[in-house]
Image (tube, rainbow, N blue to C red):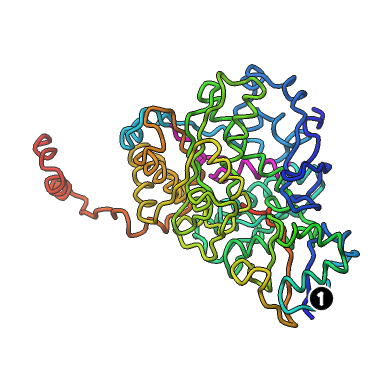
């Protein structure tokens, strides 16, 4: 395959063009660089039939992902289940609800495998041997795992105090994991300096234009699995604010290529934790600048980015599509994690609790139409944020290994059942 | 004098330097002085009298938005870092 589906990079502010290189910002105005495609060529190559004939991974949409040759990293990522969530729908009082379950993404159990697959495939194409990232946890694991499989050296920088599952889940792969005294924003600033100083490929710094495009695959999959249509509502968690925009971009690209039945009318809803809600605040106040949060304080650590790089664009998108944004406190997050687990058998990480709790709030507010179709984006796995649940859910009952002990237990818990069994 | 750190990709506009010493009592004054020497750099960092939307400035380890923005005091030993805002997440 030729690399000509991608023409280069382009500044989102001034439109200046750049070649395909490891650079994330415009050197004229610091605006974000975005991948530019030759959509005419993509249209000639991509059809529903072509996509459907390919293996079920995110690479079935490869013409819309910015890798020139064959993908070399993360070849099995994506195509996670889109679950029709009728039991949760009843609990929330809506008619048509879906869970996009990236808690079971391969290999590291979060949506970050999508962005890392693209970023590291691109890193290999650009000739990097050492890669890295600034992470709130999920990205750390994904970079570490995918770099290990690709034989790349990885430096993973995280804020000190992350969940054990996130830290172990990066270290096990042999990555150099470095905890920084400070917030994620301190980590991010340091990585911005390291990437260029050392000439390494940091997936969410100098490789960020390519990296961010990987998130589109979540939107492509949602639209295809809904039968080639975009839903009425999408609720997505927001940390840096990139994912929500890329899901929408995916719908719009499919629409532009004529792959969808009907126009895209999706309204985009953003979810944050109250302890770190810079984008939600921007949406609610219609501010033109995002006011950063200096010291995020929430159990949803994966969303604890006080100074979101795409906060401005996310808040604009949300308002332009007629969506809204809400935030929820730690208790609501845990309650929603339990609700999702108990109704759908899906154990999401804390960020998933944020998404479900915010969806519930938006439905009760009337912001989400109860009769429309709604997709909730679950981006990470509950196994990695167990600390949030300790002391919040029941401990196992301990009994002796005898029938009498079990009968006594059932008698105490459910007398009717005990009577039926007698 | 305070030291100003320049992002590597902008070095063509700072005479090839990644660190520039500059006088000034505030961030605004220090960056103003740098801009006098390197007008092309000034143009990229400022939009009129304000920092551009995607430019962050730190004094040592603190974002000046949490301090006093361009009026943030700068000491002789301080390091002022210009950081592209579009990273992370």
Q: Chain of mark 1?
A: B
Q: Is residue A300 magenta?
A: no
Secondary-structure class at tag 1: strand
Q: Residue furthest front?
A: B48
Residue A295 in the image: x percent, y percent? 52, 65
Image position, residue B84 (x, y; %) = 72, 58
Residue B30 or A81: which is nearer the viewer?
Answer: B30
Q: In the picture, which quadrant includes the N terminus of chain A?
A: top right
Asked whether A81 or A399 is in front, the reply is A81
**Label 1, on which residue?**
B22
Closer-to-camera residue (B36/A392): B36
Q: Is residue A420 visible?
A: yes
Report how many numbered discs are placed on residues in the image. 1
Residue range highlighted in magenta = A98-121
Residue at the extreme top? A49
Q: Residues within 10 Å of mark 1 (few under 14, many from 20)?
A: some
For the point 88% across and 69% down, which residue is it? B37
Residue A363: quarter of image: top left
Vertical placement of residue B70 versus A329, above or below: below
Judged from this view, the residue extending furthest toward the right is B15
Residue A213 in the image, given as x and y percentages of width and height: 67, 39
Q: Is residue B18 left or right of residue A348?
A: right
Instruction: Tell me, yes or no, whether the highlighted magenta stretch contains residue A117.
Output: yes
């Amino acid at each position: 395959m030729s690399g000509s589906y991608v023409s280069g990079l382009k500044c989102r502010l001034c439109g200046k063009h750049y070649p395909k290189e490891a650079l994330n910002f415009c050197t004229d105005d610091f605006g974000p660089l975005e991948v530019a495609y030759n959509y005419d060529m993509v249209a000639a190559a991509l059809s529903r039939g072509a996509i459907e004939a390919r293996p079920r991974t995110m690479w079935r949409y490869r013409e819309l992902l910015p890798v020139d040759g064959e993908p070399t990293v993360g070849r099995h990522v994506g195509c996670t289940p889109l679950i029709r969530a009728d039991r949760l729908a009843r609990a929330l009082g809506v008619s048509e609800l879906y869970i996009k379950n990236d808690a079971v993404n391969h290999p590291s159990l979060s949506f970050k495998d999508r962005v890392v697959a693209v970023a590291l495939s691109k890193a290999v194409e650009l000739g990097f041997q050492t890669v890295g990232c600034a992470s709130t946890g999920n990205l750390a694991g994904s970079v570490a795992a995918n770099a290990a499989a690709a034989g790349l050296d990885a430096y993973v920088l995280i804020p000190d105090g992350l969940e054990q599952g996130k830290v172990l889940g990066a270290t096990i792969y042999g990555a150099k994991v470095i905890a920084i005294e400070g917030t994620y924003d301190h980590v991010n600033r340091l990585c911005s300096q390291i990437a260029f100083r050392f000439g390494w490929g940091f997936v969410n710094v100098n490789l960020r234009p390519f990296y961010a495009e990987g998130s589109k695959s979540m939107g492509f999959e949602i639209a295809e699995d809904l039968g080639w249509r975009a839903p009425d509502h999408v609720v997505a968690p927001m940390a840096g604010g990139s994912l929500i925009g890329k899901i929408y971009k995916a719908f719009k690209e499919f629409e532009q290529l004529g792959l969808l039945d009907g126009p895209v009318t999706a309204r985009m809803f953003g979810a944050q934790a109250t302890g770190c809600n810079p984008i939600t605040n921007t949406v609610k106040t219609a501010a033109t600048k995002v006011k950063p949060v200096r010291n995020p304080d929430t159990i949803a650590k994966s969303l604890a980015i006080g100074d979101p790089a795409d906060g401005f664009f996310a808040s604009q998108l949300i308002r332009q599509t007629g969506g809204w944004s809400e935030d929820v406190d730690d208790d609501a997050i845990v309650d929603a994690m339990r609700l999702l687990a108990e109704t759908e058998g899906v154990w999401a990480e804390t960020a998933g609790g944020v998404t479900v709790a915010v969806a519930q709030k938006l439905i009760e507010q009337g912001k989400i139409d109860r009769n429309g179709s709604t997709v909730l984006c679950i981006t990470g796995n509950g196994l990695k944020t167990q600390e949030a649940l300790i002391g919040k859910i029941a401990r196992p009952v301990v009994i002796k290994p005898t029938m009498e002990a079990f009968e006594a237990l059932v008698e105490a818990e459910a007398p009717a059942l005990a009577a039926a069994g007698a | 004098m305070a030291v100003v750190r320049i992002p590597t990709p902008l070095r063509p506009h700072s005479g090839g330097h990644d660190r520039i010493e500059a006088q000034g009592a505030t961030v605004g004054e220090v960056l103003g002085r740098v801009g006098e020497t390197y007008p092309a750099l000034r143009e990229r960092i400022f939009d009129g009298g304000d920092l551009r939307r995607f430019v962050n400035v730190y004094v040592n380890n603190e974002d000046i938005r949490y301090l006093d923005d361009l009026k943030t005091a700068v000491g002789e030993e301080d390091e002022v870092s210009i950081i592209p805002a579009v990273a992370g997440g």
